[in-house]
């Protein structure tokens, strides 16, 4: 899904940016409702622009879909940035991790992001590059954000983590991954069980990584 060096630069300016965002918003709604087969003419009509305008901004449907996924995952990344900033006001490490886990679960179970995730999975055979784009714009950024949270808590002397990459996967496994698995088959984790997964998952994580008093 590399860029064509012969393709003109996308339009710029305020009007062009409004059109671009209208296209992305319309595409997100239509991809979720119609799947990846939603036509570019239908997206153009929903955005209130011409089909030529859509292609001026996005050279292909794959490129447009990548931008849709990127913006959706960017919203989750912003949530993680807000969580990290807010941890300065939470002195207790357990409360800090519970807050982090709940934010991650909320982001992962957002219906539109879950629908896009399932759409990527369903299209991997036809467009394997979509999976790589999703990984880079979504899970990889979330993992980086969580690693930064762990770094902050280690710097505060509340966690001791030798292998942060492993700890990130373990934390996701304890709190978030069950939602991704059930969501991939169109069901969700019952609310009561979801709450217990977070609490027990954080406690298990702390049993391994919480700093011990000297």
Image: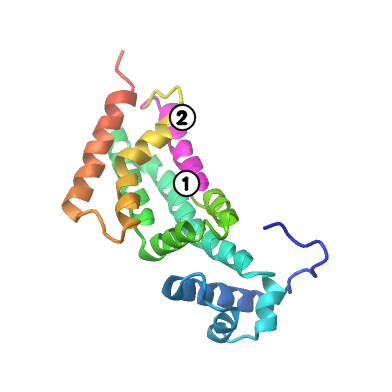
- Circle 1 residues within 10 Å: few <14, some 14–19, many ≥20: many
Question: Does the magenta segment cover residue 160?
Answer: no
The tally of labels here is 2
Q: Nearer the viewer, residue 33 or 176?
A: 33
Q: Is residue 22 left or right of residue 211?
A: right
- Identify the residue at horizontal 30%, vertical 47% (top origin): 178
Taking the image as drawn, is residue 176 in sight?
no
Taking the image as drawn, is residue 163 in sight?
yes
Q: Is residue 172 left or right of residue 56?
A: left
Q: Nearer the viewer, residue 154 or 156?
A: 154
- Residue at image mark 1: 142
Q: Is residue 198 left or right of residue 83?
A: left
Q: Which span is picked out in magenta?
A: 139-158
- Residue at image mark 2: 164
Q: Main secondary structure of the magenta part?
A: helix
How far across and how far down the image is residue 131, in percent?
A: 53, 53
Above or below for 165 versus 60: above
How far across and how far down the image is residue 8, in percent?
A: 80, 70
- Furthest-top residue in this view: 214
Q: Nearer the viewer, residue 38 or 201?
A: 38
């Amino acid at each position: 899904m590399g860029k064509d060096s012969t393709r003109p630069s996308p339009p710029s300016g305020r009007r062009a940016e409004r059109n671009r965002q209208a296209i992305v918003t319309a595409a997100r709604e239509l991809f979720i409702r119609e799947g990846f087969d939603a036509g570019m003419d239908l997206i153009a009509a929903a955005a209130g622009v011409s089909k030529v305008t859509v292609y001026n901004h996005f050279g292909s449907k794959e490129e447009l879909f990548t931008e849709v996924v990127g913006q959706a995952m960017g919203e989750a990344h912003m949530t993680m940035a807000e969580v990290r900033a807010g941890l300065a006001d939470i002195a207790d490490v357990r409360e800090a991790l519970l807050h982090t886990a709940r934010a991650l679960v909320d982001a992962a179970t957002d219906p539109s992001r879950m629908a896009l995730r399932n759409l990527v999975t369903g299209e991997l055979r036809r467009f394997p590059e979509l999976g790589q784009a999703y990984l880079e714009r979504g899970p990889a950024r979330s993992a980086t954000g969580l690693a930064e949270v762990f770094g902050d808590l280690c710097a505060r002397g509340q966690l001791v983590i030798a292998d942060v990459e492993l700890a990130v996967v373990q934390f996701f496994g304890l709190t978030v991954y069950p939602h991704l698995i059930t969501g991939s088959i169109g069901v969700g984790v019952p609310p009561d069980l979801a709450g217990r997964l977070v609490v027990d998952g954080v406690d298990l994580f702390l049993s391994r990584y919480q700093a011990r008093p000297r």
